[in-house]
Amino acid sequence: MKNNPNIVIIGSGMAGSGAAYHLSQNGVKAKMYEMNKHYGGQTSSFTFEGKYVFDNGPHLSFTSDARIRELFADSIEQDFHTIPVKVNNYWNGHWVKHPAIAHMNGLPADVITKCLTDFVNIQNLPTKETYDNYGEWLIATYGETFARWFPMRYGQRYHTCPAEKMNLSWLGNRLYKPKVEEVLNGAINKEAPNVHYVQECRYPKNGGYVSYLNKFKDLAEVHLDHTVSAIDSKNKKLSFTNGTTIDFDQLISTMPLPELIKILDNVPEDVKAAAELLSASTCVLVNIVIDREAISDYHWTYFYDEDFSFTRLSFPHMQAANNVPKGCGSFQAEHYYSKKYRPFNGDLDKAIADTKADLIRCGLLKESDKILFENAWVLDYANVIFDLDEPTASKTVLNYLDQIGILSAGRYGDWGYIWTDQSFASGENAAKKALQLTK
């Protein structure tokens, strides 16, 4: 390996931290540049008025990777909660345990009958090795009635894209495929067992989710408030909006692929066109604190009703008591938009007002509750949208980056549906490649 290789990391989130960790383990202290004035990237947490903690979107650690689980725990001196996760749904005014396909008890009889009939009927149908789109897979897996009333409806609210226009590359184990016995039991038994893919998770007791990065942020030479404006891949130079320019031997980027392509020099037209086809959702996060702790028995709730402003709701005070003062409760509501499918009009005040109205409508917020704090912000990149354009477009972009020697990592660098532990590992893998290239 070259003596003291000049390895630069763009971004200080999970992937950037993973890269910095692996490099430090190999005796290299990288230079890290973060566009924000704080460390953490997508993993950031914010404390308002010195007492209300909200993450930059809901974050929980439920990794099965024992090594990364221990790294995170050591980073906060083992100061975490282990939370037995409870998840539910709100569908047409009904509260339904998650996943709904295995917990239909309590829904209207005609809904249960139609869903069960379709689900039983598809059991004898031949299965396909591949499906043309996510919508086709849902109908083949759950039956048309349940598919259209539940996951297809929620999916469009969350991804902003119709199921028929989505591919299946992201799916993994995210949607439970139950046995007939489980579906029947859940229809007649109110206490059907929990089959959600997340059974328990960990969360720091203090400081929000970003605390998991406590011991990683000193492993690199960190420069905050540095926005990259141009990358000269041939001459290996990085320029910033503040006018400074630096050299690098190897570059690890955790930037979203479309943003990275915009600032690279001499990008071929076909690669530019592919990058423009890549879509991600935008999330408006609305945060509310009230003077009551007992809000919900569940840690997060999926909302299916199209006339509700938010798509998913979580309760930060249930993740860690220190996220709010004693006796208080907190909401974080997620509203999803995208430039391609559902543009956001920019009205944050309306998002807050709509959230409060809908919380009252579903009974989680009472007219008598005192609101102690409220705010909202926009998360420009929330989730990759795996539409039918995505597979070819992302492959074209990633292949080009590989050709010019730019190492891309993380959720938006890999352009994948990956969780925080996977993002950390993605950064580690990029760092391994960077070290190999400096030999």
Image (tube, helix red, strand yellow):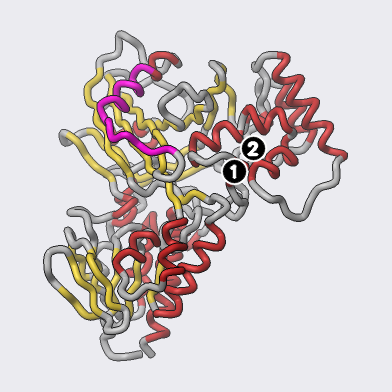
Q: CA distance from mark 1 to mark 2?
A: 6 Å
Which quarter of the rendered picture does the N terminus lie within? bottom left
Give me the disc on residue 70.
Answer: none
Q: Is residue 320 magenta?
A: no
The residue indicated by pointer 1 is: 197
Q: Which span of residues is magenta-colored?
A: 342-357
The residue indicated by pointer 2 is: 195
| Residue 155 falls in image quadrant | top right
- Left or right of 389? Residue 260 is left
Instruction: Name which residue lies at 42% across and 69% down.
Output: 269
Q: Nearer the viewer, residue 295 or 96?
A: 96
Q: Is residue 354 magenta?
A: yes
Q: Is residue 59 visible?
A: no
Instruction: Name which residue lies at 85% across and 41% down.
Output: 125
Q: Looking at the picture, how far across and down is residue 258, in whole percent?
A: 38, 60
**Please, is residue 165 above or below residue 293 in the view?**
below
Tell me whether the residue at label 1 lies in contact with that at label 2, contact meaning CB atoms closer than 8 angstroms: no
**Please, is residue 226 above or below residue 206 in the view?**
below
Which quarter of the rendered picture does the C terminus lie within? bottom left
| Residue 8 falls in image quadrant | bottom left
Q: Residue type at mark 1?
A: Tyr
Q: Main secondary structure of the magenta part?
A: helix
Q: Is residue 273 visible?
A: yes
